[in-house]
Amino acid sequence: MLRRRVVSIALIALLATGARAVMACDLCAIYEATEAQGESGKGFLSGVAEQFTYFSTFQSGGHNEANPDGEYVSSLISQAFVGYNLNKRLGLQFNLPIIYRAYGRDGAHASESGIGDASLIGNVRLYEKLGERTSFRWTALGGLKFPTGDSDKLNPAEPDFAAGIAGHDLALGSGSYDGLVGTGFFARWKRLFLTGAMQYAIRSEGAFGYQFANDWTWLGGPGVYLMLGDKCTLAIQAVVSGESKGQDSINGVASDDTAVTSVFLGPQLNFTWAGRLSAQLAADLPVSIAASGEQIVPDYRVRAALTWRF
């Protein structure tokens, strides 16, 4: 059937739990399930989205500098999600991140682990047109992030671990209720396709008077189906993603080491089977990163997602 053959891919993008190292994982889960909604009617779906990010590039004032103290952060986020499609247009989804971070400098090493900030997302298929040669789908989402993650690292009384690693980089949660809105599209002509997505996170004040800045994230790119059959599909895509985030604040006072503008580029493989299973595997390399103050920024990211529709 055409609905099974024209299978959209995961759209990755956002920092939904509040800390910088969590970038892109939540929307990996959110958009994977949003696109999965378009392939089935009423019913349940579940899955997991994984992202590993390695940070060791030191920036000062937006420029790469030497990292004499050997600062690093290894961040692994496992984003479990479960959703229910009310019908072919409307769906709900609950996301729960499980986070592990190892970090160090000059022989000092530590780690943080636990659940992050959960989110509840509603998604809607605004428009869809399917044909033998072309198809188009436009979706939107909106939701709320809850303060379920540990936010103790945001305590301003605690000293920074290193020049480029502060409490906001390590906190598992923000202590705030935040709004999430976004939209995405999928367009296909024969075996070629194009995707795009964006999301805006609206932050409120959280633990210890700390407020993460509003955050805009986006991604998209062209791809081609290598295999397009009745039972399974395999596609490869070039994904460009980016983020623009302003300065966080503490009790209304701006923090000078929290703003970032970044662009990543990398390949992504997408696989579906029998209209029920979909999987993604991707790698992202930074094309441009400019961070304010002194921060360590990503060297690379590796992403994966798996969704099963019941």
Image: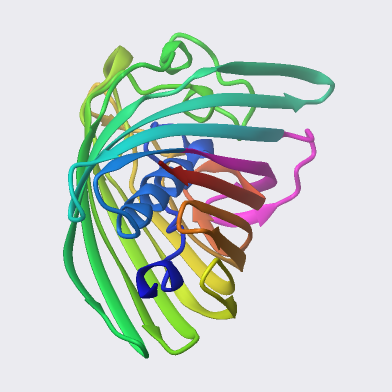
Quadrant for residue 238, please give it.
Answer: bottom right
Foreground residue, 196 or 260? 196
- In the image: residue 294, left or right of residue 11: right
Foreground residue, 211 or 78? 78
Instruction: Find out whether residue 68 is within the magenta segment.
Output: yes
Residue drawn 20% across and 29% down? 204
Instruction: Find out whether residue 153 is within the magenta segment.
Output: no
The span picked out in magenta is 47-71
Image quadrant in which the C terminus is located: top left
- In the image: residue 35, left or right of residue 225: left
Quadrant for residue 108, please give it.
Answer: top right
Give how far across and how far down residue 260 sits, in percent: 44, 51
Give how far across and how far down residue 112 sits, in percent: 61, 17
Tell me which secondary structure the magenta stretch mostly adopts: strand
Give how far across and how far down residue 183 sits, in percent: 24, 60
Scheme by which the image is coloured: rainbow
Can see residue 162? Answer: yes
